[in-house]
Amino acid sequence: MKKNKPITRVGLIGCGRISDIYLKTLSRFEHIEVVSCASLDIGESKAKAQKFNIKKAQTPDELIKDESIDLVLNLTVPKTHFEVSFKAIQAGKHVYSEKPLSTSMKDAQILTDLARNKGVYLGCAPDTFFGNRWQTVRKLIDAGEIGTPTGIFSFVGTHGTERHHPNPDFYYEDGGGPLMDLGPYYLSLMVFLFGSIVQVSGLSNRAFQQRKIENGARNGENIDVHVDTHVQAMLSFESGLIGSMTMSFDVWDSETPRFEIYGTEGVICVSDPDPVHGANIFQGDVWLRKQNNSRWSHQPRPLGRENWEIPDNLHNLSSDNRGVGLVEMVSAIEHNTTHRASDSLAIHTLEAMLGIIKSSNTHKFINLNTKCERPAPLPENFNDILQHGMKK
Ligand SMILES: NC(=O)c1ccc[n+]([C@@H]2O[C@H](COP(=O)([O-])OP(=O)(O)OC[C@H]3O[C@@H](n4cnc5c(N)ncnc54)[C@H](O)[C@@H]3O)[C@@H](O)[C@H]2O)c1
């Protein structure tokens, strides 16, 4: 095990629903310490600090000015991602943000340019494509198991978030909706598997103008819907592959497969144990059906790594390990390499999503200007890379 690994000091801004999962993941690494947390509500920040043994609860401005902090983890709501990340980068800190990177291409470009000028790293969720099922799919594709991939079908249908999220407002505001909320998971993993998207089109509508919160302190309160909640998109990739993507908050239930990839010599089906979620989680089964075999075969995950010792779920990235993209970014900072959950990936997928919305409004195909190289698959020793900052 490497000795004296430098400690990266993280400041968390946004102490809401998703922060527990991140803090749980990060608490497992000795070389990463969350030293402060902040939100709009100091009471919420103090409670979070107490629950996770975080030394300081500060205001967002205090945290950004705090010189002991190297990296800001931005878990605020989509419409404030830009403002918080901008201030943090301006203050010379690395940033890892929840998705989307921002709600406009102009803002996303400002962030990436600023990060480059300041010499800091900018990373963005999702990191679910680090999960063993997607790494397995990548390995099957790169090994030519389905020949040349020609088509993708993807679907995620839920009935929104107001049944389980106590403050679901942001899901129905600019930067929300099923496309901006769930699209990053699907588009990031498609780029991870197949590379740049060159053209998109879309159609969208919304079933409801208002939603009723059905849990928590605001149970019964109606909120306005400002975005479309049922989106159908078509995607065209530089490789020649084409795909379809349906993202909806207007679906009560569905038996539709979540994700399939069609190739000249076979099919990969990524089924899902969770009927609600699709590709936005780490786990799930991978099935392969080849041209010359009439049966589906269940693929071990991670492929070729069955003999790994897995003391708990973190190492095989099969459970919810949101935050592992930040851990990998810290490793990239240390070794001066490229991180996988990167700003280039985030800006490319953002352009695709905004293109789908534009297409829906204009009824035209939209060509994308940005490109993104496929993030490299995780190395076979990724487990060790993760482990060598791991708490015993
Ligand atoms: N909840 C989930 O299941 C989930 C899953 C994956 C990703 N995400 C993403 O994580 C992000 C946060 O989601 P959440 O569910 O935790 O939201 P939440 O509403 O529960 O919490 C948001 C937090 O951000 C803080 N905040 C808002 N504006 C701020 C500002 N201007 N400055 C400082 N703090 C501010 C709030 O005080 C609160 O602590 C979103 O981008 C969401 O898309 C959420």
Image (cartoon, rainbow, N blue to C red):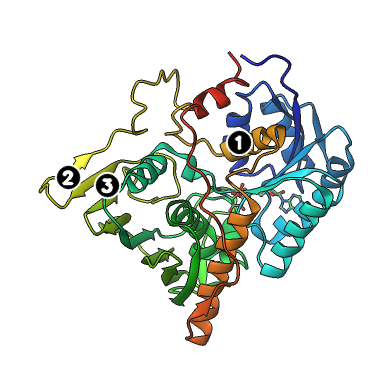
- Which picture quadrant has residue 338? top right
Q: Residue furthest left?
A: 294
- Residue position marked by numbered label 3 in the rendering: 145
**Dot 2: within a 10 Å radius of its alpha carbon, few (fewer than 14), some, or many (20 or more) residues?**
some
Q: Is residue 234 above or below residue 169?
A: below
Q: Which residue is mark 1?
A: 328
Measure the alpha-carbon separation of dots 3 and 2: 13 Å
Secondary structure of the residue carrying tag 3 is loop
The percent position of residue 111, horizontal first and vertical second, equals 75, 58
Of tags 3 and 1, the one toward the viewer is 3
Taking the spot 65% from the left edge, 57% from the top edge, the residue there is 101
The tag earlier along the polypeptide, 3 or 2, is: 3
Q: Name the residue carrying label 2.
A: 296
> Contact (CB < 8 A) between labels 3 and 2?
no
The amino acid beneath tag 2 is: Trp
State the image coordinates of residue 225 (x, y, percent, origin top left): 55, 70
Residue 344, given in percent of the width and then of the height, sits at: 62, 56
Q: Is there any visible trace of residue 316 in the rendered image?
A: yes
Quadrant assignment for the C terminus: top right
**Can you tell which of label 3 and label 2 is closer to the viewer?**
3
Tell me the crowding category of disc 3: few under 14, some 14 to 19, or many 20 or more residues within 10 angstroms, Cα based: many
Q: Is residue 342 left or right of residue 309?
A: right
* Residue visible at 42% across and 64% down in the picture: 239
196 relative position to 65: left or right: left
Q: Secondary structure at mark 2?
A: loop
In this rendering, position of residue 230 left or right of residue 351: left
